[in-house]
Image (cartoon, grey):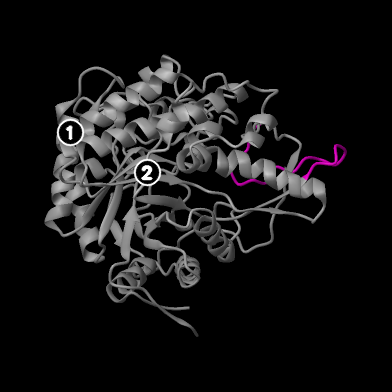
Amino acid sequence: MTEHVFPESFVWGSATAAYQIEGAATEDGRGPSIWDTYSHTPGRTLNGDTGDVAADHYHRWQEDLGHVAALGLGAYRFSISWPRVQPGGSGPFNRAGLDFYSRLVDGLLERGVRPVATLYHWDLPQEREDAGGWPSRDTALRFQEYAAGVVEALGDRVHTWTTLNEPWCSAYLGYASGVHAPGRTEPAAALAAVHHLNLAHGLAGRVVRELAPAAELSVTLNLHVVRAASDSAADRDAVRRIDALANRAFLGPMLDGAYPADLLADTAAVTDWSFVRDGDEKLIAVPLDVLGVNYYSSTLVRAWDGVSPRSDADGHGKSDASPWVAAEDVDFLPQPGPHTAMGWNIDPEAFTELLLRLHREYPAQPLMITENGAAFDDVVSADGTIQDDRRVDYLRRHVAAVAEARARGADVRGYFVWSLLDNFEWGYGYDRRFGIIRVDYDTQVRTWKQSAHWYRRLAATGRLDA
């Protein structure tokens, strides 16, 4: 057995998102978001579940911060609900909403926990979507104004500002495959959304630099590890095309200051990218203190032969429309188990591979694991305990993968487990549980799972036996 020892400076944290845990969907001036609309549309979510109540964190935040402190965590990553603090996505701010997050930030600081605030975790105000949503440039400009209002209110107390969470999902799942809000299936709009999310990141990042110069600046990307089914030229080109859509569409403008030429060529039949204006790419490339990395599983692809039944096992939900714009002739192949309850393969070696790729391509860029975790079908024992051995094993193996990447030179500075609490898992409703703390949705009682006790020991010692 190998022991990995993390330095005292390594940050152990947990992560959540506003719509997934807060509830209080119509309280204290909060306006509707695209996820309110989407989840209330019949057939969109499993069992018709919505985030109306979720984990009731809006009312139970002090209890939840008590769990963060009891876990001994150094940081807590949460997201700010745009429609809670600015209900229409433009115009006046809602003081009650800002006050909620002010109390949350103060509560973290009182407990010795770093606040890590994400400005956008998918809950676009419905009025912004009605005005065009992320395919519209105006949404990026309104996001800049929203960021300024929030940073002005909280900027002197937030340790790290994260502009966006997983813009890949916002753009492609929201506007191409339609399995996320707002549920549109418009490939050209999805690519416009990619750009305007990137632009929103750059604009908001510059707001943070101006208004909170002492804070750290971040963005969180769900980067894909894409492997070829064979060494054929066609399969290797399938990897290149998916890598362009999944990874380089964001890494290119954010870190290199330009979209990759092959992405523009691959998608030329869908859009001419005329929505990219002179100077946009320079605006997007705001220097980052840390790049947030979300990782859960890997991807296996091959070039479709045009004859066999198509395989779409990409792990991103079933739809008649593909999220992979202009790559509908790429097969996403099922992978051998074991799998999580999401149907995602468990591949910690790919995690190390991803971190080493980032280190190789961007050696001066510090990294932070902003999400990693697993959903399993937890069983509550007769004595009330939850022995989630598979989650503990998943976390142990993936933390070891981080240690391996660090040993080989990757500058990974922290790890945030997903998630602190069981929560509303988007299209899967309340059926999938990622939390290290169980939430009984009938009573809202919180119960530590075995994984929470394991994670507390890891955070306390920085030592991992793997």
The residue located at (44%, 44%) in the rendering is 425
Q: Which residue is mark 1?
A: 152
Identity, as a three-letter code, of the amino acid under mark 2? Pro
In the rendered image, residue 31 lying in the magenta stretch gets the answer: no
Among the two numbered marks 1 and 2 on one chain, the one whose residue lies closer to the N terminus: 1
Q: Residue 73: horizontal and vertical position, in percent?
A: 26, 63
Left or right: residue 435 versus residue 456 is: right
Secondary structure of the magenta portion, mostly? loop
The 10 Å Cα crowd at callout 2, few under 14, some 14 to 19, many 20 or more, is: some
Which residue occupies the foreground of this view, 73 or 361? 361
24 relative to 55, above or below: above
Which residue occupies the foreground of this view, 353 or 118? 353
Q: Residue 117: horizontal and vertical position, in percent?
A: 28, 44
* Residue range corresponding to the magenta coloring: 303-319
Identity, as a three-letter code, of the amino acid under mark 1? Glu
Q: Which element type, helix, strand or loop, lies under badge 1?
A: helix
Q: Which element type, helix, strand or loop, lies under badge 2?
A: loop
Q: Residue furthest bottom?
A: 1
